[in-house]
């Protein structure tokens, strides 16, 4: 951690030494309250726009933007807590990664523009990317080295077992069961399968090891986010194993939202808003008035699984609507015509809205159908995800309305 410089007093005598020691002790505990990220990326033309974008599983907005002049750049600002960011040319992929905290960070690198066939977005890689003045980035780079070692292992066993892979690929292309069976008996293929199994076990051990080393701080959920491409409800135990401090960190909260979209059972329901055809805005609380249980259903006209679930919801609605059960369907359709056409085809009896007020974003909806069962009176979450649709929805409603 970078600390403020303290003054050195050049006086003689024991008393003066004590004063200097006291000043050192006081200032050692202080931290900067702002950051400065500056440096040079050679190969970038003047007026090139550089941005700092948080690294997470979401599409994050940049937290800083600057212009390259005379080959140099500088960002300044304040950062509430350390996060991983990507320094890159605006509207491109690539760049370099560092941890941003309130410290002075110096960067060097060489820009190399690449094009990927079939992709519109440009790649501008930063080679020889050096970050100085950031102990946190050094720590991240240590973990990255452990991650990179897995790539070496992967390439080695793929190269070692080329024969078996080629045989199996040709067998599948031929669609000949006999050839596939013969390829399965090939020693090179058997070795490949064994190596593959050992590799993925090593991946899990490496990732778990890094995360377990950091369960008490923000590093735990931060590294989990960095190492895994996504989270599912099956990783609830991992999240729950973190300390409260880690769970409440920026990465901890994002991890919670991904594993428990809409919140954890028993937590306050997020107060979404919808807008009706008359332009009136309604909150979840207003939509729940006079009801006992509310099912919020995020769907879309083009979503096959969503529409397959509708008959089940209709059946539950028919059973319990007179007992205080309400359904609120919110479509994430971008095209209003497609949504209205689907409404006409499905003949839904309950309130329906198109999401023009970011309700799906508030509930961290990443895939649909996404359903949330809510206690209308206490405005708390009862169940979500797999526990709020299909047979589990029917079972939960039967329990609630018994």
Image (cartoon, rainbow, N blue to C red):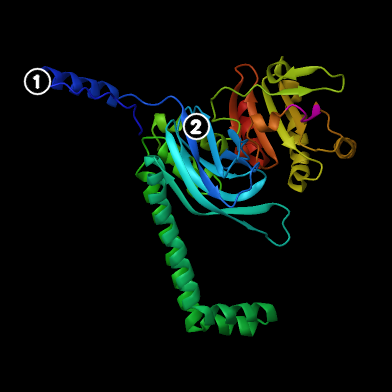
Nearest the eye: 71 or 344: 71
**C-alpha separation, residue under disc 1 versus residue under disc 2:** 47 Å
**The N terminus: image quadrant:** top left
- Tell me the element at label 2: helix
| Up/down of 199 relative to 353, above or below | below
The number of discs equals: 2
Nearest to the eye among marks 1 and 2: give it. 1
Where does the image place residue 390, in percent across and percent down from the top left? Answer: 67, 41
In magenta stretch: residue 354: yes
User: For mark 1, what is the residue?
Assistant: 14
Callout 1–callout 2 Cβ contact below 8 Å: no
Where does the image place residue 317, in percent across and percent down from the top left? Answer: 75, 30
Left or right, 44 with reference to 105: right
| Up/down of 360 relative to 272, above or below | below
Label 1 environment density (alpha carbons within 10 Å; few <14, some 14–19, many ≥20): few
Q: Residue at x 52, y 79 (%)?
A: 162
Q: For residue 119, which quarter of the picture?
A: bottom right
Using the rendered image of the protein, determine whether residue 401 is visible from the camera's viewpoint.
Answer: no
| Up/down of 96 relative to 153, above or below | above
Q: What stretch of residues is rendered in magenta? A: 352-357
Using the rendered image of the protein, determine whether residue 334 is visible from the camera's viewpoint.
Answer: yes
**The C terminus: image quadrant:** top right
Q: Residue at x 70, y 52 (%)?
A: 121
Q: For residue 104, which quarter of the picture?
A: top left
Nearest the eye: 380 or 17: 17
Where does the image place residue 340, in percent across and percent down from the top left? Answer: 88, 35
Nearest the eye: 80 or 23: 23
Q: Residue at x 44, y 61 (%)?
A: 150
User: For mark 2, what is the residue?
Assistant: 250
In magenta stretch: residue 30: no
- Tell me the element at label 1: helix
Q: Residue at x 44, y 38 (%)?
A: 105
């Amino acid at each position: 951690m970078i600390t403020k410089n303290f003054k050195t007093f050049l006086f003689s005598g024991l008393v003066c030494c004590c004063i200097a020691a006291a000043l050192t002790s006081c200032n050692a505990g202080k931290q900067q309250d702002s950051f400065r990220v500056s440096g040079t990326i050679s190969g970038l033309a003047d007026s090139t726009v550089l941005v700092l974008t948080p690294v997470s599983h979401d599409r994050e907005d940049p937290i800083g933007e600057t212009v390259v002049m005379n080959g140099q750049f500088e960002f300044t600002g304040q950062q509430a807590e350390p996060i991983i960011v990507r320094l890159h040319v605006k509207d491109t992929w690539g760049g370099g990664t560092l941890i941003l905290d309130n410290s002075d960070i110096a960067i060097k690198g060489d820009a190399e523009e690449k094009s990927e066939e079939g992709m519109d977005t440009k790649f501008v890689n930063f080679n020889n990317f050096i970050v100085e003045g950031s102990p946190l980035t050094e720590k991240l780079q240590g973990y990255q080295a452990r991650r990179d070692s897995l790539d070496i292992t992967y390439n080695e066993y793929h190269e070692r077992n080329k024969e078996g892979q080629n045989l199996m690929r040709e067998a599948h292309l031929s669609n000949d069961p006999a050839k596939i069976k013969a390829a399965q008996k090939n020693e090179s293929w058997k070795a490949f399968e064994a190596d593959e199994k050992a590799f993925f076990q090593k991946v899990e051990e490496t990732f778990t090891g890094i995360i377990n080393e950091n369960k008490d701080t923000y590093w735990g959920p931060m590294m989990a986010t960095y190492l895994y491409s996504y989270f599912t409800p099956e990783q609830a135990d991992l999240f729950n194993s973190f300390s409260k401090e880690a769970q409440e960190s920026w990465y901890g909260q994002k991890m919670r939202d991904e594993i428990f979209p809409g919140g954890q059972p028993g937590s306050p329901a997020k107060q979404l808003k919808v807008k009706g055809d008359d332009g009136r805005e309604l909150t979840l609380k207003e939509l729940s008035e006079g009801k006992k249980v509310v099912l919020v259903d995020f769907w879309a006209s083009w979503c096959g699984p969503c529409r397959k679930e509708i008959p089940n919801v209709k059946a539950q609605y028919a059973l319990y609507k007179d007992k205080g059960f309400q359904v609120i369907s919110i479509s994430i359709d971008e095209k209003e015509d497609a949504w209205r056409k689907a409404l006409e085809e499905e003949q839904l009896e309950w309130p329906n809205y198109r999401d023009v007020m970011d309700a799906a974003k508030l509930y961290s909806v990443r895939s649909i159908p996404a359903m949330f069962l809510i206690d209308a009176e206490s405005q708390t979450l009862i169940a979500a995800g797999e526990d709020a649709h299909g047979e589990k929805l029917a079972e939960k409603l039967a329990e609630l309305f018994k």
